Structures are given as structure tokens and as C-alpha cells.
């Protein structure tokens, strides 16, 4: 089992460890019992993950003498709202949970964000542990303490920064993950290579097939690498005031495309298109060399992710959506651009005509 330590400013948050390995469920339960003592453990999960792993995990906790129960909610982004938070809090009260209770988020990013949010507000906060089961959650959402739910005004608008006590990444969960969900994670992995680590990017270029077929050794090294990158960014900018924004590479346009397609474009697909667009914009502004744009597009394509924007999406409407988001965010949309692979920077003033031109180009 590999360990990555997240070192945070002791005045505001405690540091914690990310443990990564394959077939480590039994060791996870033992580590929980040893290092995260609590009077009661409540596993929060969605019905999809609950059906696959809920019973087994609860049994494993009970087998070593822990007081454990489970709360499930319907899988999917539609559950990520304040009503689910209230339902979970109600069930916690009914089951006698108190401040000695530890929550365990077992699931993808939706479960992690909701369970973390509940943990941050239930009885003025109880500890929680992240056990991510999607690739997105294993390389991204379970690390860094951003919790929250969506609101009628937009995504992730109600939330807190609240760090978990530990993150346990069991790669075996990925064996049951549908390909579309796995590809969402691939987009985030490629993003890390582009924004932080040219060596990792080259490694992905050479071994993308091994990653797509979940070669255990390569998958372990890549996931560990991503956790290292995410934790380094979070250590410097825990509360998202500056550097952490580079993690949004490809996301500004990606989110707009997802929303415009009424979510028939997945998050990973939107980010993939957004990353290609950001690379092309960087090149057109004279920052990025054309061979690097080409490398980015080729890798994204080889990962099974889209590099073209569907013709059915109206460019004007996409730009209008970006402008609306910009208004909501105080007049600035932080577009993350590239000087080269591994060297991102933030540009708050991208001409909409340039974005429109790149979108049109990407429809060809
Ligand atoms: N907090 C953060 O820093 C952060 C970062 C990135 C994304 N997010 C959030 O994460 C969410 C997306 O997370 P996600 O992509 O993990 O989606 P998700 O949590 O919706 O999971 C996707 C689907 O996969 C199923 N699933 C999960 N694990 C499985 C497994 N091992 N086998 C089979 N099926 C499994 C789930 O039941 C669900 O239907 C978004 O709400 C996003 O806002 C948060």
C-alpha cells in the first residue's frame, strides 16, 4: 500500500494520509479501527455502490467489532442537493448518531461531496473518511476537502471546506466501474499531466493503452502520481484563492458544453473538449507551440475522449452561457491557458470572439 501525506496548515486543518493499493478493503477496516476510533461508524453511499459493496463493507467493519450502519440515497448528480443532506441528517438523528460518530463516504464524487458536507455541519461537525470508488473520486474529488451540494442557482454553490481524516483508495473498485465513468477519470488524469507534469504526460502518451485496460502496476503509479499533484496544489492553496484554480484547466468551457448538451455530454467528455479548446486558444495567443497542442489532442483522442465539439451545439449559445457564468462570478472567468505542457497560467481576459472561433474550428 502506498501512502501520500497531505500536509495542511495546522492552525486551520489537520493533515491526513491517502492510502492507495489494490485489494485493500480488509486493511482499510483495520486502519479505521486503529487510527480513527469512534463510537459509531455510518457509511454514506448511493444505491449503486451500496448494492455492489455496501453489505460487504458493513460486514467487514462489524467483523472486527465496530458499531457500523449504512445510509443510502439514489445514485446520480440529481441527488446532490440540500434535501438529500437533510434526509441523511434526519436518518443520523434517528439512528442515535452523536459527536462520537464517524461518517464514511463510500462512493464517487457525489457521495464524497454530500457526505463531507453533512460531516461538516452535523452537530457542528463530526469526522469523516473518504473511500472513493470512481476514478474521478480516487484522483480528484476525495482529496482536498471541498464539500457541497448543487443549488437551483448552480452547481456546488452550497458547501464548505472540510478535510477528511483519511482517504483510502482501493483500486479494485474500478473493476466494476462502467467505461464511461472510467473515461471521466481519464480526462482528469490527462489534465494533471498537462498542468503539472510533462514527464507524466509523456508516460501517458507511451502507455495510454495500459491505463485504459487498467494494468494494475501502471494504474497504481498513475493514481499515486495524480494524488501527489492534487495534494501539492491543495497544500499551497487549500481554500481556492489562487493556485488551486489551475485544476480547472478545460473545465470552464467543459461545464458550459455539459450544460448546453443537457448533460448528454459527460463531465469527462466536456473537460476533454475544453482542454483541446484551451490548448488551441493558448496556441492562437502565441503561448503554446503547435506540436504541443497536437500532442494534447492526440493523447485525449487515444484515451477514447472527444476532441471535436458536436455541430448540434450552437456556438452563440455556448458563448452566451460563458458570459452568464462570468456575470455570476463577478465579471471574471478564469480561463486556464498553457505556456507549455506542465506550465499553466490563469488569464481572466479571453476575447469571446477567439473562443467562438476555436469552437467553430473544433466542429470541423
Ligand atoms: N470535491 C471536489 O474537489 C470535486 C472534484 C471533482 C468533482 N467533484 C464532484 O464529483 C461529482 C462527480 O463524481 P463522479 O464522477 O465520481 O460521479 P458519481 O459519484 O455520480 O458516480 C458515478 C456513477 O458511478 C457509480 N459508481 C461509483 N463507483 C462505482 C463502482 N466502483 N462500480 C460501479 N459503479 C460505481 C455511482 O453509483 C454513480 O452512478 C460531481 O458532483 C462533481 O461536482 C468534486
Image (cartoon, grey):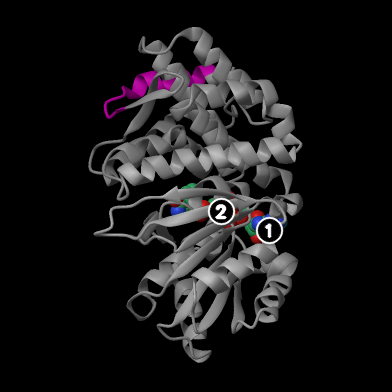
Q: Report whether 13 appears left or right of 364.
A: left
Image point 31% across, 24% down: which residue? 350
Residue drawn at the location 73% of the way across and 49% of the way down: 178
The percent coordinates of residue 61 (x first, y second) are 65, 76
Query: In which quadrant of the rendered view does residue 317 lie?
Result: top left
Q: Which of the two residues, 15 or 184, is positioned nearer the viewer here? A: 15
Magenta residues, start to end? 346-361
Question: Which residue has dot 1 on it?
Answer: 24
Spot occupied by residue 127 in the image (x, y as percentages of width and height): 43, 71
Q: Nearer the viewer, residue 360 or 302?
A: 302
In the picture of the structure, the residue carrying the numbered disc 2 is: 19
Relative image position of residue 49 (x, y in whole percent):
68, 64
Contact flag, marks 1 and 2 (Cβ < 8 Å): yes
Q: Earlier in the sequence, mark 1 or mark 2?
A: 2
Q: Secondary structure at mark 2?
A: strand
Separation of marks 1 and 2 at Cα, in angstroms: 9 Å
Quarter occupied by the C terminus? top right
| Residue 170 vertical position relative to residue 268 in the rendered view, above or below | below
Quadrant hosting residue 34: bottom right
Q: Foreground: 350 or 176?
A: 176
Q: Nearer the viewer, residue 35 or 136?
A: 35
Left or right? Give the position of 353 relative to 52.
left
Residue labelled 1 has its Cβ within 8 Å of some atom of ligand 1: no
| Quadrant hosting ligand 1 | bottom right
The answer to whether 334 is drawn above or below residue 231 in the figure is: above
Q: Is residue 352 magenta?
A: yes
Q: Does 37 sit above or below residue 341?
A: below
Q: Residue at point 60% right, 81% down? A: 68
Amino acid at each position: 500500500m502506498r501512502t501520500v501525506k497531505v500536509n495542511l496548515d495546522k492552525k486551520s486543518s489537520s493533515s491526513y494520509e491517502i492510502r492507495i493499493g489494490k485489494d485493500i478493503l480488509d486493511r482499510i477496516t483495520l486502519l479505521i479501527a486503529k487510527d480513527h476510533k469512534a463510537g459509531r461508524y455510518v457509511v454514506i453511499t448511493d444505491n449503486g455502490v451500496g448494492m455492489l459493496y455496501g453489505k460487504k463493507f458493513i460486514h467487514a467493519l462489524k467483523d472486527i467489532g465496530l458499531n457500523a450502519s449504512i445510509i443510502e440515497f439514489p445514485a446520480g448528480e440529481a441527488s446532490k442537493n440540500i434535501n438529500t443532506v437533510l434526509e441523511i441528517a434526519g436518518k443520523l438523528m434517528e439512528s442515535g448518531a452523536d459527536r462520537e460518530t464517524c461518517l464514511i463516504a463510500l462512493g464517487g464524487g457525489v457521495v464524497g461531496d454530500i457526505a463531507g458536507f453533512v460531516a461538516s455541519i452535523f452537530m457542528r461537525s463530526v469526522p469523516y473518511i473518504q473511500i472513493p470508488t470512481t476514478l474521478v473520486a480516487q484522483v480528484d474529488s476525495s482529496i482536498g476537502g471541498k464539500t457541497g451540494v448543487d443549488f437551483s442557482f448552480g452547481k456546488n454553490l452550497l458547501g464548505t471546506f472540510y478535510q477528511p481524516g483519511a482517504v483510502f483508495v482501493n483500486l479494485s473498485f474500478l473493476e466494476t466501474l462502467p467505461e464511461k465513468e472510467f473515461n471521466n477519470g481519464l480526462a482528469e488524469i490527462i489534465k494533471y499531466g498537462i498542468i503539472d507534469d510533462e514527464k507524466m504526460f509523456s508516460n501517458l502518451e507511451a502507455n495510454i493503452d495500459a491505463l485504459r485496460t487498467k494494468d494494475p502496476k501502471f494504474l497504481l503509479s498513475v493514481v499515486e502520481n495524480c494524488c501527489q499533484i492534487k495534494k501539492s496544489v491543495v497544500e499551497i492553496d487549500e481554500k481556492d484563492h489562487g493556485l488551486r484554480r489551475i485544476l480547472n484547466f478545460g473545465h470552464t468551457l467543459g461545464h458550459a458544453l455539459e450544460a448546453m448538451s443537457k448533460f448528454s455530454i459527460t463531465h469527462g467528455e466536456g473537460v476533454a473538449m475544453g482542454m483541446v479548446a484551451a490548448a488551441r486558444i493558448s496556441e492562437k495567443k502565441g503561448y503554446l507551440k503547435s506540436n504541443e497542442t497536437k500532442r494534447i489532442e492526440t493523447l485525449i483522442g487515444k484515451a477514447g475522449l472527444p476532441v471535436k465539439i458536436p455541430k448540434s451545439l450552437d456556438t452563440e449559445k455556448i458563448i452566451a452561457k460563458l458570459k452568464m457564468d462570468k456575470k455570476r462570478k463577478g465579471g471574471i472567468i478564469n480561463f486556464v491557458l498553457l505556456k507549455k505542457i506542465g506550465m499553466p497560467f490563469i488569464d481572466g481576459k479571453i476575447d469571446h470572439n477567439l473562443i467562438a472561433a476555436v469552437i467553430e474550428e473544433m466542429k470541423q
